[in-house]
Image: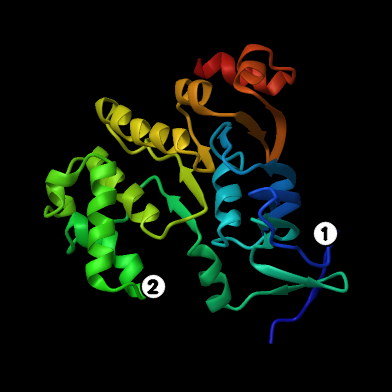
Amino acid sequence: MVQPTETKARPDRAESTETAPMVSFRNVWKSFGAIEVLRGIDLTIERGQVVCVIGASGSGKSTMLRCVNGLEETTDGVIEVGGELIGVRLRDGRRYELSPREAAAQRRHIGMVFQQFNLFPNRTALENVMEGPVVVAGVPRARARRRAEELLARVGLSDRAGMYPRQLSGGQQQRVAIARALAMDPQLMLFDEPTSALDPELVGEVLGVMKQLAEAGMTMIVVTHEMTFAREVADRVAFVDAGRIVEYGTPAEVFGHPTHPRTREFLARVQ
């Protein structure tokens, strides 16, 4: 049995409602041993918003994403997705960790696209997209196949459905990875530097798919070094430094009129 621990988080329970923000960080801390990676993150993301998270390597951006879908447990504070607490229950001021099965069930509704494509090498593009719905959600294969075909068409890969990952370019593999995440019908999509492993000429095809998702109203958190994408697509931009959000606002505010010295220093190097 998991032992409860004291927490500084405020709520004892969360209500799942259609009007709740899609994502809410409340005083989120994450430590690896003595190293504090996240230090009191507070952030609210409304449904349909695209938030781009920028900052130097090692600032805590990827850890933020991994805490959202429960791949990392928060040390303190809480994260809610759609009004539901992620990874823990709170009762009488104490934290109780969810079981692995409960945590996995939560992740089914949160799509994540990683830097590396993580496709099954022995399955075709179509089979990779079908895998989650069939194995995890128990969707009949015929229905999963139709949905996978629709999603591959959506990312412009209908003609690559029967190919294996080794036969696809990096950009094509990442688009398959996006289709695979969408196959679980997520309410939220997380992107962890999805173009960082791509050759420069392949970046545009992946960002194009992401722009289409944003235009369709998908709620997205995107950790990225693509400043042009953040300027054009994001509703809000968060600059993270040493585990804290030190600047947050519209792209025009963050890129055009940054107020924090670290933001100005960072943007001077990358723009």
Q: Which residue is mark 2?
A: 136
Q: Which residue is mark 1?
A: 9
Q: Type of residue at label 2? A: Val
Q: Quadrant of residue 102?
A: bottom right
How far apart marks 1 and 2 lie (CA) works out to: 32 Å
Given this view, does label 1 or label 2 mark the residue nearer the observer? 2
The residue at the point 12 percent across, 44 percent down is: 159
- State left or right for residue 128 relative to residue 190: left
Q: Secondary structure at mark 1?
A: loop
Single out the residue that lies furthest toward the bottom.
1
Number of marks in the image? 2
Label 1 neighbourhood size at 10 Å, few (<14), some (14-19), many (20+)?
Answer: some
Q: Is residue 120 visible?
A: no
Q: Is residue 139 visible?
A: yes
Instruction: Tell me where residue 117 appears, x and y as whole percent.
Output: 32, 50
Viewer-nearest residue: 177 or 62: 177
Instruction: Tell me where residue 176 appears, x and y as whole percent.
Output: 27, 49
Instruction: Tell me where residue 141 appears, x and y as whole percent.
Output: 24, 71
The residue at the point 61 percent across, 44 percent down is: 47
- State left or right for residue 115 relative to residue 41: left
The residue at the point 36 percent across, 57 percent down is: 183
Instruction: Tell me where residue 9 appears, x and y as whole percent.
Output: 83, 59
Measured along the vertical axis of the image, is residue 92 above or below residue 193? below
Measured along the vertical axis of the image, is residue 223 above or below residue 69? above
Q: Quadrant of residue 253?
A: top right
The residue at the point 47 percent across, 55 percent down is: 186
- Work out which quarter of the rendered image holds the N terminus and state it: bottom right
Q: Type of residue at label 1? A: Ala
Label 2 neighbourhood size at 10 Å, few (<14), some (14-19), many (20+)?
Answer: few
The image's mark for residue 88 is none
